[in-house]
Image (cartoon, rainbow, N blue to C red):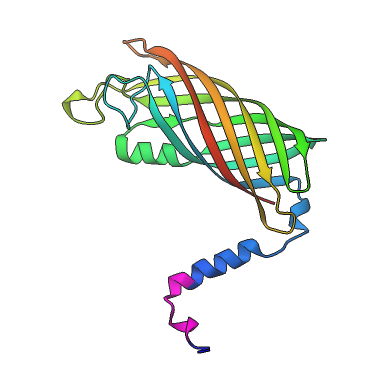
Amino acid sequence: MNIHAFSKIPSPLHGWWLLAVLLLLPSPALAQSSTLIGPRARMGGRYDNVRMCVATPAGVNGGPAMDISAFFSWKVGQGTRLEFDLPVMRPILFGAAFRMLQFEPSVGLSFELRRTPASVLRAGPLAGISLHYGPDVDSESSGDGRTASFFALGPIGGANASLTFLRPRGRFDVQVGLTLYATRLVSVDDPADHKGFVLGGSLDIGLLFH
């Protein structure tokens, strides 16, 4: 075996190998932490009769909805956790590419329903706020067909269920979940008086670092 062969691999690959090794190293002490943080990817769809959807033609009520958020979870009681979801990708992407804002942070309570040595099943309600600045549902994303931007906001209510695959001697657990939500949007200082509803759902996949 040529012991120098690995040194010929490009340095970026060395970095990925190092990251993988660090993430998978055993860490029993960290696994006992009551605070969990990590990234969460959300992929789904929604009905939306207020806001422009960048993935569908003008006049279509809704379409696919995706985001990557920062997720925080704290133990607040026996089997109960307080969770906070902070969207990151959509506010940045929409602001940079489409000159609009969609920001929907939420908090939730998650109750433990079933636990085994390998997994935890949880479910609970969530609530948040939806903030929008941009065109309406009849707008094109650019050009002469783009309508005037307006500000709208409203409450979010919903529920989340998740299955967390435990890695007691690892640095993170893997969580797969389902979120359903509804939003009532009302515009502010808007001559057209936009208002309506958003109904949606998403499949959520996240890494929970201890």
Please state the horizontal and vertical placement of residue 35, each as a whole percent of the image: 71, 45
Q: How many marks?
A: 0
Query: On the picture, is 58 further left or further right than 152?
Result: left
Residue at 62% of width from left, 61% of height from top? Answer: 23
Where 5 falls versus 155 (above or below)? below
The furthest residue to the front = 1
Q: For residue 109, which quarter of the picture?
A: top right
Please state the horizontal and vertical placement of residue 209, each as a whole percent of the image: 65, 51
Residue at 76% of width from left, 39% of height from top? Answer: 75
Residue at 44% of width from left, 29% of height from top? Answer: 45
Where 103 falls versus 70 (above or below)? above
Query: On the picture, is 65 further left or further right than 123?
Result: left
Please state the horizontal and vertical placement of residue 181, each as a whole percent of the image: 54, 23
Q: Which span is picked out in magenta?
A: 5-13
Q: For residue 115, which quarter of the picture?
A: top right
Whether residue 121 is in magenta: the answer is no
Whether residue 9 is in magenta: the answer is yes
Query: On the picture, is 39 further left or further right than 198?
Result: right
Q: Foreground: 105 or 174?
A: 174
Q: Principal SS element in the magenta part?
A: helix
Q: For residue 25, which quarter of the picture?
A: bottom right
Residue at 64% of width from left, 36% of height from top? Answer: 162
The furthest residue to the left = 144
Where 125 falls versus 30 (above or below)? above
Please state the horizontal and vertical placement of residue 67, each as a whole percent of the image: 46, 38
